[in-house]
Amino acid sequence: MKLCFATNNDHKIAEVKKCLPGSFSLVGLKEIECDEELPETTRTIPGNSRQKAEYVFQHYRVDCFADDSGLEVEALQGAPGVDSAMYAGPQRSHADNIALLLKNLHGIANRKARFITVITLVLNGTFYQFEGVLNGTIIDTPRGAGGFGYDPVFMPDGESRTLAELRMDEKNAISHRSRAIQKLLNFLDSKAVV
Ligand code: IMP
């Protein structure tokens, strides 16, 4: 089955491809000849997820899914949340975002945080949403060279390594994104589309 993952992020496409059975042909936005920046103007993660999927469906008429993710920190009332990518400004620098996060958490004992992903699937014109969550804590000093984003400061519950210190397959086994993807797959399976 051919399905478009509405993203230009090759890292994400590679991550998701590893979770998908061979019966799937996963294509990115490039393959459907979409080189536009997708709109992400709502103020919530589920809202942005739906907005991107809806845009691709309306303009390209393909079965597709979009994801939107973010880091929610309990002591910061859920920030950076929907602003995770541009927390420290429009330059979207992972290093700047981490530096601001650590600054805002300086002296705060409660380090509880979670990553959340919401996937919106459009299948034959109907919309469905799936959520994946990974709970953990934010450490004081970045560690590890893998992954991306906030991975070097996020330690999943029950782990002594940060997400950036895990191998890609180890991160995939527990990540918020793979949990949401698994729900998507279970759904497609139940509809016998896989
Ligand atoms: P997106 O919606 O998946 O593009 O995620 C928005 C932002 O959340 C990213 O730019 C990262 O800052 C952060 N983020 C999402 N997923 C991850 C992850 O798996 N590791 C680290 N940071 C992430």
Image (cartoon, rainbow, N blue to C red):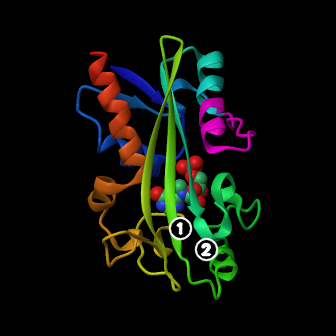
Q: Which residues are magenta?
A: 36-51
Q: Is 41 left, or right, of 167 in this rendering?
A: right
Q: Is 185 left, or right, of 53 in this rendering?
A: left
For the residues labelled 2 and 1, the Cα–Cα distance comes to: 6 Å
Q: Is residue 39 magenta?
A: yes
* The CB of the residue at mark 1 lies under 8 Å from ligand 1: yes
Q: Which mark is residue 17?
A: none
Q: Which mark is residue 98?
A: 2
Question: Dot 1, how many residues are within 10 Å of its Cα: few (below 14), some (14-19), or many (20+)?
Answer: many
User: In the depicted view, which residue is nearer to us: 133 or 95?
Assistant: 133
Q: Position of residue 167 (x, y in %)?
A: 29, 65
CB-based contact (under 8 Å), mark 2 and mark 1: yes
**From the viewer's perspective, is residue 85 above or below residue 117?**
below
Q: Amino acid at mark 2?
A: Ile
Q: Amino acid at mark 1?
A: Tyr
Q: Position of residue 70 (x, y in %)?
A: 57, 54
Residue drawn at (57%, 14%) of the image: 61
Residue drawn at (44%, 81%) of the image: 143
Quarter of the image where one finds residue 20 = top left
Q: Earlier in the sequence, mark 2 or mark 1?
A: 2
Q: Position of residue 38 (x, y in %)?
A: 67, 35
Ligand 1, image quadrant it occupies: bottom right
Quarter of the image where one finds residue 45 = top right
SS for callout 1: loop
Quarter of the image where one finds residue 184 = top left
SS for callout 2: helix
**From the viewer's perspective, is residue 68 above or below residue 187?**
below
Residue drawn at (65%, 66%) of the image: 93
The residue labelled by disc 1 is 150
Q: Is residue 194 visible?
A: no
